[in-house]
Amino acid sequence: MQEDMTIKGFLNLIKKRMILISVTAVIVVVVTGWAVFYIFEPTYEASEYILIGNLQNTNTENSYEETQKIPQMLASSVDFIKSPIVLSAVKEELDLRGTSLEEKLFIENNKDSQIVTITVKDRDEKLARNIAKTTAVISLEKMNTLLKFNQVKILEKNDGIIKKNNEVAALAIALITGLLSGIGLAVIREQLDDSVKKEDDVENLLGMPLLGKFDSKIEFRKSSKEKRPYEEYDPERRQLVAKEKEKQVDQATSIS
């Protein structure tokens, strides 16, 4: 029988089904860890940085005018880097004609910043680095020739690359998911169990008060002489057996 579950009942359920919950969580974590480390390939991220304008403005007559041009130059640069003019040249340079470069390339410019970030994500570490570097170089060349941007340069940086897969976060999420799944299975199993567990369940089911109860697990002890069940628990049969034994004794006595 099932009734509305209270907080205490829920906690007792978790304690009762702790093995089921723990096993479910472990299985989910193991499967997720195996998939993360052995099935899903890691994604690598490489970045290049282009500086638009001059950060060290001097107090000249043209400094104010140059400052006003920078926001327009930044917006134009972001759109220009993503344009087919640059992407086609990058594909041709790296022989990536069959590759969807637009899905791998991300251009960012933070507010009040003169730096444009070119980020490339790919499962091939070397290819991600080459695409980012080639895109920055070609963008700089074409901005100088087509847009006449003179104050544009690539910032020097270490050839570092970031591995984006976060195994710890994936395993943590898997652990939480496993625990919730285990609790869900425990609740479902408890709700589907219609067996009577308490005296109150009988009263609620029948609508009548409980008059008594018996233990269905009573153990019958055997005597030291290993009496047979009918001899120990059937009085009439026991008397007949006793009379039969007395008769046999009398016959043996008369013969002797």
Image (cartoon, rainbow, N blue to C red):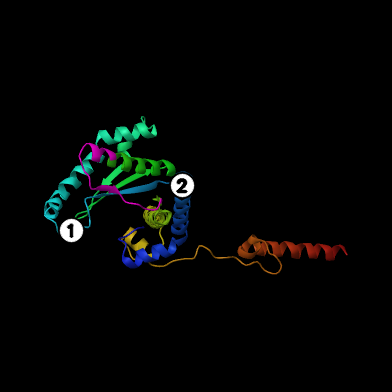
Q: Position of residue 145 (x, y in %)?
A: 24, 37
Q: Give the residue displayed 70% in from the left and 69% down from the top.
A: 224
Q: Assess whether mark 2 and mark 1 are in contact (beta carbons under 8 angstroms).
A: no
Q: Give the residue displayed 40% in from the left and 57% down from the top.
A: 172
Q: Is residue 145 magenta?
A: yes
Secondary element under disc 1, as helix, strand or loop, is: loop
Q: Is residue 213 left or right of residue 118?
A: right
Q: Label 2 is placed on what type of residue? A: Ala
Of 247 and 108, which appears nearest the observer? 108
Please report the bounds of the magenta region as a residue range: 141-159
| The image quarter in which residue 251 lies | bottom right
Q: Position of residue 144 (x, y in %)?
A: 24, 40
**Disc 1 versus disc 2: nearer the observer:** 1
Q: Is residue 77 magenta?
A: no
Q: Is residue 227 left or right of residue 248?
A: left
Rounded to the nearest angstrom, the CA distance separating label 1 from label 2 is 56 Å
Secondary element under disc 2, as helix, strand or loop, is: helix
Q: Give the residue displayed 34% in from the left and 33% down from the top.
A: 91
Q: Is residue 111 left or right of residue 161?
A: left
Q: Position of residue 97 (x, y in %)?
A: 36, 30
| The image quarter in which residue 89 lies | top left
Q: Position of residue 95 (x, y in %)?
A: 39, 31
Quadrant where the C terminus sits is bottom right
Give the residue at the far right of this rendering.
256
Of 1 and 127, which appears nearest the observer? 127
**Does the rendering let one see residue 83?**
yes
The circle drawn on residue 58 is 1
Which class describes the residues within 10 Å of circle 2: few (<14), some (14-19), or many (20+)?
few
Of 54 and 160, which appears nearest the observer? 54
Q: Which residue is mark 2?
A: 35
